[in-house]
Amino acid sequence: MAANLSNTRRRPARQPRRRRHRASARRRFNGCRAAALRAFTAGQLYTEKRAPSLAAAAACCGSNISYVKAAAILIREPESVRKAVLEGRASLLKAAHEAQRRQKAELVTVQDMAAAWSVWTPAARAEFGRTVGVAEIWDHAIEPTIAAERGELAQVAA
């Protein structure tokens, strides 16, 4: 009788159904990227001092701290940058990084740059020239200076 049991057919194990993964939350809200919109809302709360910290603003709006920090930086930028992020044409984090670089560059004075130049080694100055480009330095720094000096000399001679 044991031989008869070994010949019985076994049903194959049932394969689990394959389901299409769905996002747990909406990605767009009225044409705007939902995550960016939540981050801008939280950033506005934080910049207006209605939330005591980035973490509190993020928690109130369902965002995260890095997105809220990026949005707070972009709030000071032109509307076109924010619109590009909300429409999904630009990454929130990349746009904030570029904006932060621009904002820091605006704070650097000519006196600060001249002081830095004076302590650089010749190799560092050469690297600066290669990085910026000789044409850029000539066209936007040296040539205007020469033209201004020639104009002053022409005025003195006349």
Image: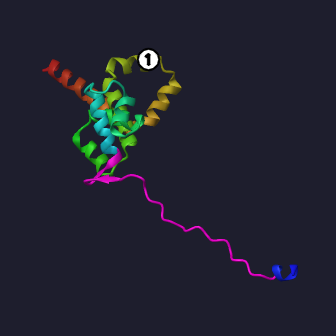
**Along the viewing direction, whichever of 138 and 52 lies nearer the viewer:** 52
Q: Amino acid at mark 1?
A: Ser
Residue 124 is left or right of residue 1, and the answer is left
Task: Reply yes or no: does residue 15 show up in magenta.
Answer: yes
Observer-nearest residue: 97 or 129? 97
* Quadrant showing the C terminus: top left
Closer to the camera in the image, 70 or 137: 70
The residue carrying mark 1 is 118
Q: Residue 127 appears at what percent x and percent y?
A: 49, 31
Q: Residues within 10 Å of mark 1 (few under 14, many from 20)?
A: few
Q: In the figure, residue 59 lies in which quadrant? A: top left
Task: Name the residue furthest front.
Answer: 1
Q: How many numbered discs? A: 1
Q: Picture coordinates of residue 58 (x, y %)?
A: 37, 35
In magenta stretch: residue 120: no
The dominant secondary structure in magenta is loop
> Magenta region: which residues?
7-35
Question: Residue 121: where, in percent of width, then height?
Answer: 51, 21
Q: Is residue 130 above or below residue 104?
A: below
- Foreground of the two, 33 or 84: 33
Using the rendered view, name the quadrant where residue 1 is placed.
bottom right
Colour scheme shown: rainbow
Residue 146 in sight here = no
Q: Is residue 65 visible?
A: yes
Q: Is residue 1 above or below residue 50?
A: below
